[in-house]
Amino acid sequence: MNSETLYEDAVKLKPAERLHLIEKLAESLSKPDKDIERIWAEESEKRYEALKAGKVKTVSLNEIINRYK
């Protein structure tokens, strides 16, 4: 089943059933993915260590704002 077929079936549901489906789908998107959380934690540690070691240049907020005006 593809998303278009699923959509076509979903719009045939009663409004309350569609709302329930929307809520369930939205809920499924807010569940954290353990692998992604682990990868981001590792990446943030690498970035922090690089910052502490002076391997990256920091840029102030004002510099960024001025750069993209």
Image (spheres, rainbow, N blue to C red):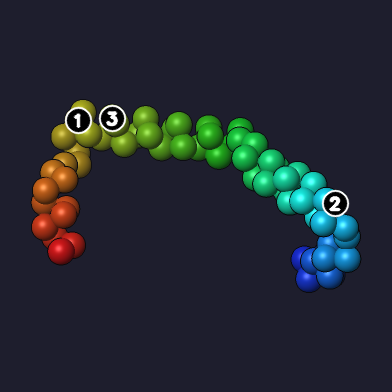
Q: Please tell me whether mark 1 sits on a helix, a strand or a loop.
A: loop
Disc 3 and disc 2 in contact, CB within 8 angstroms = no
Q: Residue drawn 29% across and 31% down?
A: 48
Judging from the image, what secondary structure is the residue with disc 2 in?
helix
Mark 1 is surrounded, within 10 Å at the Cα level, by few (under 14), some (14 to 19) or many (20 or more) other residues, namely few
What's the residue type where badge 1 is placed? Ala
Q: Which residue is mark 1?
A: 53
Q: CB atoms at circles 3 and 1 under 8 Å apart? A: yes
- Mark 1 or 2: the one toward you: 2
Q: Which residue is mark 2?
A: 17
Locate residue 36 relative to residue 50 in the image: left or right: right
In the rendered image, residue 47, in percent from the top left (x then y), is placed at 31, 36
Q: Which mark is residue 49?
A: 3
In the visual, does 16 lie left or right of 44? right
Give the mark, 1 or 2, whose residue is nearer the N terminus.
Answer: 2
Which x, y percent locates residue 42?
A: 44, 32
Q: Nearer the viewer, residue 10 or 19?
A: 19
Residue 21 in sight in this render: no
**What's the distance in space between the residues labelled 3 and 2, CA to CA?**
50 Å
Q: Quadrant of the N terminus?
A: bottom right
- Residue 24 image-quadrant placement: top right
